Image (cartoon, coloured by chain):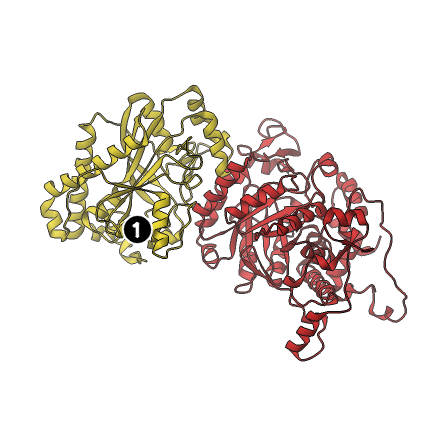
Amino acid sequence: MLKPPIQELQTYYKTIRTRRMQLILKVQATAFRGIRDYLDNNGFTELLPPIIGPVTDPGIRGAKQVTIDYYGKEYKVMSSAILYKQMAAASLDKIYFFSPNVRLEPLETATTGRHLVEFVQVDIEEANITYEDAMRTAENLVAHIVSYVVDEAAPYLEELGRTLRKFRPPFKKITHREAVELLRSKGEKVSYYTEIPWEQEEKLSRMFDEPFFIIDYPKGARGFYDMEDESRPGILRDFDMLYPEGYGEAISGAEREYRYEKVIARMRESGEDPAKYGWYLDMLREGIPPTAGFGIGVERLTRYLCGLSAVWEARPYPKIAGVYSP
Amino acid sequence: MSSALLRIFFKLFRGSEKIAAARSFIETYPIDEITQKARKGKEAVFPFSEKEEFGKALLGAPIFEQAPLRYDTLSKILLVPPLFTPLRLKKMQEILREPVFTDVDTSVDVGGFSSSMPVCIASMGSTDVFNKVSLQVARAAAEAGIPMGVGENVATVWGYAQRRRESQPCFKERVMTYLQHAEEGRGGVFIQQSVEDAYDELWNKVYSDPDITPYIEKGRVAFEIKLGQGAKPGIGGETFVSRDIALKIRDKYHFDDDPATVVKEVYSRHSAPGTFTADILRSMLRLMKNNYPRCRIWVKAGPYRDVEEVAQIVYEQEAEAMWIDGKEGGTGMSPVIALKDLGLPTLACLQKIKRMRERGLQLDLIVSGRIIDGGDVVKSLCMGASAAGMGRPIVVAAYAAGEEGVKRFLEALKMEMQLLISALGKYSIKELGDEDLRATTPELARSLGIKSVYD
């Protein structure tokens, strides 16, 4: 449990001028160049991210969406751009954008050091690939970013006192079931049917010294857009990548369900009326190619690269659950 | 009709178009009995309207039903005590005197909450008749230490934290009134979300609400997935709303006429029943556990013929409780034909509960549907229910005598339970079993798997 710096948050205009914050932001900017360097050289097209729309990602653990009044109608602020990723990959095959997201997270997340209400993720989606392919992109990307930052931001890292080492993919993969068994063997109470709670995820992450994947989450633990494996009912073709050393989740990704009837049935799991996803369902009914992809949160990435204790250090104007700040 | 009855009649059913509904309710529901309890509390447990009558009356068991029954109800089974009561002896050894009925401990743990008695207040929704008295009920339930539900559509229709109409409490008032009045560690509130409430992510809103969070952390809040209700299994919420409200919620519900283009006084509002398969339910429960790890998860089902299969899934996915509402269950609004022809009667639901217990199902099961008095509750418990749910008696008690009326009704209810349980020679809820029951006909006994009065 970390205490959010509630007082300091009110005067972050001072914090941003500190040497430490300058170093962190320099490393972060280097990481952005590393991301673009990899993706642009591997055939991806960068697009502008959506910010508002009639619906957004419902698959966020316990977090509330932000609603805005749009000329008498309601719009949601993107909690993730997932629905638009499928839309864009259907046109340009390999796409990415730096997507700002807002999630009114439950208050308990204020002390995890891993949650921000406002954050940016790099959203990546490719048409006609499997989730294994998406994991290859993910591990190559992360390995490239780390190597790029180690080479290009060495003096900043040194001044921050952070030693970072390069990795060579492929990264280790364990299934969700194996992860649960591993945690249970250490006396942790975790369920086979839900995502691994933050506290246990951190413990799991400490058991590894390289980034690794947790794959094949149980159905119900993720949003309706993660595809169920037809040969293994109840198992989703999806993954998380975790940083080592206790830094926890880096990436969340999946092969997407793109078939209209399946999506309709899956939407019921959240108790929603599919009607509200009008445009998205129209798009699926008319047909889109299968896609797979993932999102990588840039504040968490920065936290890992710089060895920070909390994500709020990785943003010049952090918003923490329940705290009103500039 | 007594004057008290008349008063309730007028309070409940203002407006002439509602007279027919009022007449049918008065004729078929024991309003007088509930009103007496609401006004006099424990005194009403005895058959005197005034204390002075004691010693001047000769009484006996009632043998008539007011009207022929369409199907078997709890009145067709009796609680039959033995003379030999080894558990009473045990109680005597524990308390060093002859036990009396007040020694019965009615407290239970149900659905992850601790309750002062095996009774929960049903999730009543946005219908005017209940919403108007909902805060009185919330205070009384909290102080009595029993869990209370907040039904669907309340936030969408009456507002989340701000009233849409001066006379109608909003959602958060109902929740907070209960939580702020409840004793530490006793009771809890379970909250429903309809398909339409999901549009506004009601549960997520509650889960990140700074005022409710401390109570969530103490384990006092449950989310109740509604899979149906007794009065209209398989049919979604049906209600009438006035134009000002209809205009505010027209994007989220289906109306008979669009309030924006057709001007009339009231609009009929339909909501969807929701589509389920075993797989959808299983995933939905996992999703709930995943998204709201600090809340209890409850499920409310209608009297469906596959209710046992549903319960098995609910149990496997580790929800804290499942509520089964029999076809006699109350409603603010339901098609007449549904009331008449849809669903399993409460007694049949109890028979399913008994069968599930025999198969070893550990899930907390709550039964409701015309549970009127302590006898109904105790019989339900003997059939294997973990608690009984009540809606209408609470509404009637609130209209009869406000918050105090509900409290007095609950006190009388508790006393009735204590009397009956002690008569059976038992002093705690978990000692009750089907050995305490006898069916009034051999055929019913066979169907329920209990003894008959002739065995």
Assign a secondary structure to mark 1. helix
Residue positioned 42% across, 44% down in the render: A64
**Residue B437, above or below A45:** below
Q: Relative to the observer, which residue lies in front, B356 or B253?
A: B356
Residue A102 image-quadrant placement = top left
Q: Relative to the observer, which residue lies in front, B226 or B29?
A: B226
Left or right of residue B140, residue A148 in this image: left
Name the outermost residue toward the left.
Answer: A155
* Figure quadrant of the C terminus of chain B: bottom right
The amino acid pointed to by label 1 is: Leu
Residue positioned 90% across, 67% down in the render: B57
Residue B453 image-quadrant placement = bottom right
Q: Please give the chain letter of the residue carrying mark 1.
A: A
> Where is residue B65 drawn, in percent x and y?
84, 50
Q: Tell me the colour chain B is drawn in.
A: red
Left or right of residue B381, residue A115 in this image: left
> Where is residue A6 drawn, in percent x and y?
31, 56
Q: Tell me the colour chain A is drawn in.
A: yellow
Q: Relative to the observer, which residue lies in front, B168 or A206?
A: A206
> Where is residue A85 drawn, in percent x and y?
33, 29
Residue A101 visible within the image: yes
Q: Relative to the observer, which residue lies in front, A243 or B414?
A: A243
In the picture of the structure, the residue carrying the numbered disc 1 is A204
Left or right of residue A59, residue B255 in this image: right
